[in-house]
Amino acid sequence: MLTHSFFRCLFRATVALGAVLLTVATSRGQNTSTLYGPNGISPAAIRQGILGSCYFHASLAAVAKADPAVLRDAIRGNAQTGYHVHFVSGPDELVYAEDIEYARAHHYDRSEGEWVTILMRGYAERKLRQGMITAINRSTLIPAFVKSLALSELQSSGPLLVAYDRAIRSVVGLDGQLDKAAFQTNLAHELTLLGVSATQAQVLEGLLEHGGFYEELSNTVKENGEVFGAYRGLSQGGIPRSVMSAFLGNAHAAPVSSPDLVAELRALHTGGKAMVAGSKNVSPFGTQPPDWYLPGHAYTVLDYNVASRVVTLRNPWGSRPSPDGVFELPLATFQQTYLMFSYSDIALP
């Protein structure tokens, strides 16, 4: 006859085995607690780092508010083999664990979990890929067979863009400028480390010597310097519309004086829309602006109260004001202190 103690032992063994299997399964896939943090994919989880990347963090928070599933589905793979970041168009971008660790160690991003850092690195690689393709297509000096080989490489996912991202991060200046000689040396090193074949490396390194390619690449980095580690100030950042388009496939921008503003705010309140607002570069408050106001800064527009005509915004710093950077403004004040708003429609089922 089986005793109660036997069943207790069997139960404990079963629970222990389940825990082991869960641990193994998690280690082979995504560690969700590390990846997403306690608040999951939400605006509250996002905190901009020491870079001037407000446009990226505010835009990502807007997408997280409107449709968090879009961002969850954008991350595939795991830390062991590398994360693949999926966008509406173009190939996936590859992000390795060491690049996540590098960005976190250098305080590029202070968000909960690693998902924002992963998406930030993927977005940086995407901008590089687009800039390089544009440069190759525009050039009249790159031989046709080289163009064909290079474009073929740039249409596929892999470590190529990781090498470019790392090489740029190692030499980019405070203003987003690149040292060409140092960049070439570091690029060759990174291509070798990542196992890019000698033939591929030769083609891609050789592009830097063809007219227009390096200049176009430099412009791409300069325009998006913050996601590559350029410590630029407020009002120098990239475009929120570009970030939202990458994940949602469409985005628009208009001045806050636009007659469409209130209609878009109403649509934001009902759901299915992401929105970011950029404050004016010159403070209308003189030398003593309120705590919530930063000139030339991007803010997530979280909601709009139709009855009271009040706009709810969030500073991607996660502060100013405390505790989480969330504050409310009358519509009239919003229109006086902000210059542009960018918005994107979510593809509702």
Image (spheres, grey):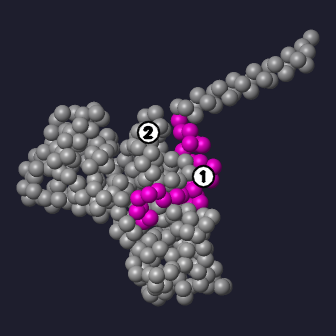
Does residue 34 appear in this view? yes
Instruction: Give the residue pinned by disc 1.
Output: 40
Q: Which mark is residue 92?
A: none
Q: Quadrant of the C terminus?
A: bottom right
Above/below status of 121 relative to 317: above
Q: Quadrant of the N terminus?
A: top right
Above/below status of 90 relative to 257: above
> Comparing marks 2 and 1, which lies closer to the viewer?
2
Does residue 239 appear in this view? no
Question: Residue 258 at what x, y percent from top left?
Answer: 44, 86
Q: Farthest front residue?
A: 287
Which of the pair 295/98 is nearer the observer? 295
Q: CA distance from mark 2 to mark 1?
A: 19 Å
Please, what secondary structure does the residue beneath circle 1 have? loop
Is residue 31 highlighted in magenta? yes
Above/below status of 52 relative to 182: below
Please indicate whether residue 332 sits to the left or right of residue 4 in the image: left
Q: Farthest top residue?
A: 1
Please indicate whether residue 207 sits to the left or right of residue 164 in the image: left
Please, what secondary structure does the residue beneath circle 2 have? helix
Q: Tell me the residue at 60%/52% (across/down).
A: 40
Q: Which mark is residue 97?
A: 2
Identify the mark nearer the N-term, 2 or 1: 1
Q: Tell me the residue at 63%/27% (across/down).
A: 21
What kind of residue is marked 2? Answer: Ala
Question: Residue 302 at what x, y percent from top left?
Answer: 57, 70
What kind of residue is marked 1? Answer: Gly
Q: Tell me the residue at 74%/23% (across/down).
A: 14
Please report the bounds of the magenta region as a residue range.
29-55
